[in-house]
Image: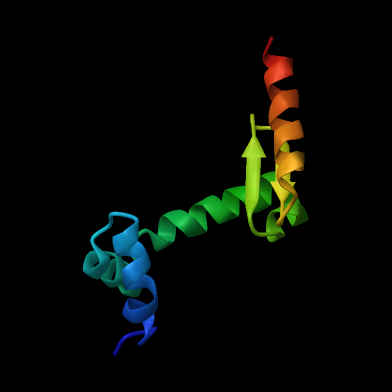
């Protein structure tokens, strides 16, 4: 039995609109494809950033600027700009 019986009806059209094979996408979702890789990435994030890694999304800029949670676009711009300036 499917883990998420309505997944295809909800996700399938979105996957198709993004140019993906909708049937394959839902099959992989149901099958847990890449699950271990996601869990491994999460473990590394917890080890590296501690409790900051509990927010979703977590985006790290230039290996040093973690952005956690839904933030205003301007915050992303400032952090990326700061990282670019430090590369010079």
The answer to whether 57 appears left or right of 81 in the picture is left
Up/down of 70 relative to 8, above or below: above
Q: How many marks?
A: 0
- Which of the 4 image quarters holds residue 74? top right
Residue at point 32%, 78% (across, down): 8
- Camera sees residue 26: yes
Q: Residue furthest bottom?
A: 1
Residue at point 28%, 54% (across, down): 19
- Which of the 4 image quarters holds residue 5? bottom left
- Camera sees residue 32: no
Task: Point out the image quarter for the C terminus.
Answer: top right
**Image x and y of residue 25, in percent:** 29, 65
Up/down of 3 relative to 66, above or below: below
Residue 74 or residue 31, whichever sits in front: 74
Residue at point 42%, 59% (across, down): 36
**Image x and y of residue 55, in percent:** 70, 59
Residue 21 or residue 51, whichever sits in front: 21
**Image x and y of residue 34, in percent:** 37, 58
Up/down of 85 relative to 68, above or below: above
The answer to whether 4 appears left or right of 38 in the picture is left
Q: How is the image coloured?
A: rainbow
Task: Point out the image quarter for the N terminus.
Answer: bottom left
Q: Residue furthest top?
A: 88
Up/down of 16 relative to 9, above or below: above
């Amino acid at each position: 039995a499917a883990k998420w019986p309505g997944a295809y009806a909800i996700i399938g059209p979105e996957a198709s609109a993004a140019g993906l094979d909708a049937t394959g996408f839902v099959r992989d979702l149901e099958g847990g494809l890449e699950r271990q890789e996601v869990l491994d990435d999460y473990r590394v994030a917890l080890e590296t950033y501690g409790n900051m890694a509990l927010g979703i999304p977590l985006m790290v800029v230039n290996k040093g600027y973690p952005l956690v949670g839904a933030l205003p676009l301007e915050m992303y711009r400032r952090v990326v700009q700061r990282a670019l300036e430090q590369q010079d």
